[in-house]
Structures are given as structure tokens and as C-alpha cells.
């Protein structure tokens, strides 16, 4: 069985397109954050890097801006698309947001081009190491393994497979998302390898990463999943590789970068 974050269960949204019942929003002066707060409990995470058949909201609606900017509780997208969509909704029908939508439409069948546009708008190339963020900043985990929008009170708006028991848009702390990553060895391997590729690339450690990948694939193929003991062992192996690369695997902020207010460009 190949390593694939799709093996993490995706829970479809059951809430209407509004904040989940009982959740109290902290009002934000950032327009994109306001949009995200109103969408909590909605949207549906899929891990595809491009708008594939199962990751369809952008693919199906780029030619229909009204539908694109009014997602439903079952609108499937990845985390980076969700961050972009909050910005597009916040600054709808500006020249810049219209340009971005047109460019995505033109690149929808080009994996590299499509992701380059996403990276440009959400600010990945301008992100820098940080130990804090403000509402409206974009927060990247393990290079860009996961992407979320900085919200209020040290939380982010995140579309992923947790940490709550759903794959819907939710608020979480960076530390909670880091812990979620480490609790899932398949995700942790991909995240650690993504960070390593950007920050190190040491050939000897690269070989060890590939060896752990092979062991992980063999374990998944043999058992269809990992036992608690296997999860612990693989997490320890990945921790060790990160230590060899000069990182502290227990410090979330060593694997986080932040882009300052990149979605504001969509207001132009």
C-alpha cells in the first residue's frame, strides 16, 4: 500500500454553511478571517494537490464565480485552496481576484502551473520562520504540507482531517496541528520529508528517509494499517531523522513559516 494521506479518513460536512453550533467566534477586523469564521464546520477536506475528480470545487466552478465563492457544506478542496477561497470571497470582484481566478482556470489541467499560482497568492515563497502570527497571516507547516489562515487568539483556520473528528474547516492551535501530524506516521513521514527536502537534502539522511518509507509501505501492505506499537516506532524513526537534520522534532515552531498578510493583494 503506498503512503497516501487519502488513507486518513475524510469526514464529510454535515453542518450548514455557517459556524458550527455552539462555537463562539472572536470577531476579526481581517476580512478573510471573517469569511473563514463564518464557514467553520463547513467545506470538505480532500488531500489532492490539484482539482481532481474528488477534489472538485475549484475544477467545477472556476468558470462560475458566483458558485465558486458560495461553497456548500460538501465542497471538496485542499487546505491551500481553502485559504485562497477565503481571500477570494473577502475581496470578491476586484481586478486582482478576477485575474487569479482566470489564471487558475487556464491552468486547471496543469499541475505545476496551478500550484504555482496557489503558492504565489497564499505567499509560500515569501514565508519566513516565525514564532507567532497575526490574523490574516498565512501559516505553513512542514514546508507546505499543510496551510492554514492565521485567526485570532493564536489559532488558525484550518481545513484538514482534524484535530476534531471531521474534515471540515475548524479553528485549532499550531501545536494541535503539529501533534495531529505526529500521531499519524504516514502524514508525519510526508511532512518531515517535505521539510527535509527544503531545509537540508543531505544525501545520507535522504537514503535513510527512503529506507523508512520502504519499511512503512511494507507494514501498511502487510497489515492494512499500523498497530499502536508500529505507530510509536515509526514516529521515533522519523523523529531521529529530523534530529540528524538539525531540528528538534518536539518543537512545532521549527517546522512553521509565516507569510505576512499575503491575501491583501487580492483587494487591489
Image: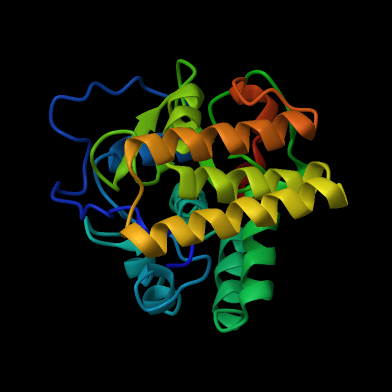
In the image, residue 130 sits, relative to residue 137, either above or below, namely: above
Residue 102: x percent and y percent?
58, 75
Q: Residue at x 69, y 65 (%)?
A: 116
Q: Is residue 199 left or right of residue 173?
A: right
Residue 202: x percent and y percent?
86, 47
Q: Quick one: 14 or 205, which is closer to the camera?
A: 205
Q: Residue at x 47, y 67 (%)?
A: 2
Q: Quick one: 111 or 88, which is closer to the camera?
A: 111
> How does the figure colour the protein chain or chains?
rainbow
Locate residue 113: give its quadrant: bottom right
In the image, residue 154 sits, relative to residue 142, either above or below, namely: above
In the image, residue 22 sits, relative to residue 212, either above or below, namely: above
Q: Residue at x 70, y 56 (%)?
A: 120
Residue 14: x percent and y percent?
13, 50
In the image, residue 161 sits, relative to residue 237, either above or below, namely: below
Q: Is residue 23 left or right of residue 182?
A: left
Q: Is residue 212 left or right of residue 89?
A: right
Count of numbered badges drawn on the protein: 0
Q: Is residue 31 visible?
A: no
Quadrant holding the N terminus: bottom left
Q: Is residue 224 visible?
A: yes
Q: Residue at x 14, y 46 (%)?
A: 15
Locate residue 237: give its quadrant: top right
Locate residue 184: give its quadrant: top left
Residue 169: x percent and y percent?
33, 43
Amino acid at each position: 500500500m503506498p503512503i497516501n494521506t487519502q488513507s486518513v479518513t475524510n469526514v464529510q460536512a454535515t453542518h450548514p454553511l455557517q459556524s458550527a453550533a455552539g462555537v463562539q467566534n472572536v470577531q476579526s477586523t481581517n476580512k478573510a478571517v471573517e469569511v473563514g469564521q463564518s464557514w467553520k464546520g463547513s467545506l470538505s477536506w480532500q488531500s489532492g494537490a490539484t482539482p481532481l475528480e474528488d477534489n472538485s470545487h475549484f475544477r467545477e466552478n472556476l468558470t462560475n464565480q458566483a458558485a465558486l465563492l458560495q461553497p456548500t457544506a460538501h465542497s471538496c478542496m485542499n487546505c491551500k485552496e481553502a485559504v485562497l477561497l477565503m481571500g477570494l470571497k473577502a475581496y470578491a470582484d476586484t481586478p486582482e481576484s478576477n485575474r487569479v481566478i482566470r489564471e487558475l482556470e487556464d491552468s486547471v489541467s496543469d499541475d505545476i502551473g496551478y500550484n504555482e499560482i496557489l503558492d504565489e497568492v497564499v505567499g509560500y515563497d515569501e514565508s519566513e520562520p516565525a514564532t507567532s502570527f497575526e490574523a490574516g497571516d498565512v501559516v505553513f507547516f512542514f514546508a507546505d504540507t499543510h496551510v492554514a489562515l492565521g485567526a485570532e487568539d493564536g489559532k488558525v483556520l484550518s481545513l484538514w482531517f482534524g484535530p476534531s473528528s471531521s474534515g471540515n474547516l475548524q479553528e485549532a492551535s499550531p501545536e494541535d496541528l503539529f501533534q495531529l501530524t505526529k500521531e499519524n506516521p504516514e502524514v508525519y513521514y510526508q511532512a518531515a520529508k517535505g521539510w527535509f527536502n527544503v531545509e537540508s537534502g543531505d544525501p545520507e539522511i535522504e537514503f535513510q528517509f527512503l529506507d523508512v518509507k520502504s519499511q512503512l509501505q511494507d507494514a501498511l501492505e502487510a497489515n492494512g494499517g499500523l498497530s499502536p506499537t508500529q505507530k510509536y516506532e515509526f514516529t521515533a524513526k522519523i523523529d531521529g531523522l529530523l534530529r540528524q537534520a538539525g531540528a528538534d522534532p518536539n518543537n512545532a515552531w521549527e517546522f512553521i513559516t509565516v507569510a505576512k498578510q499575503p491575501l491583501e493583494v487580492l483587494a487591489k
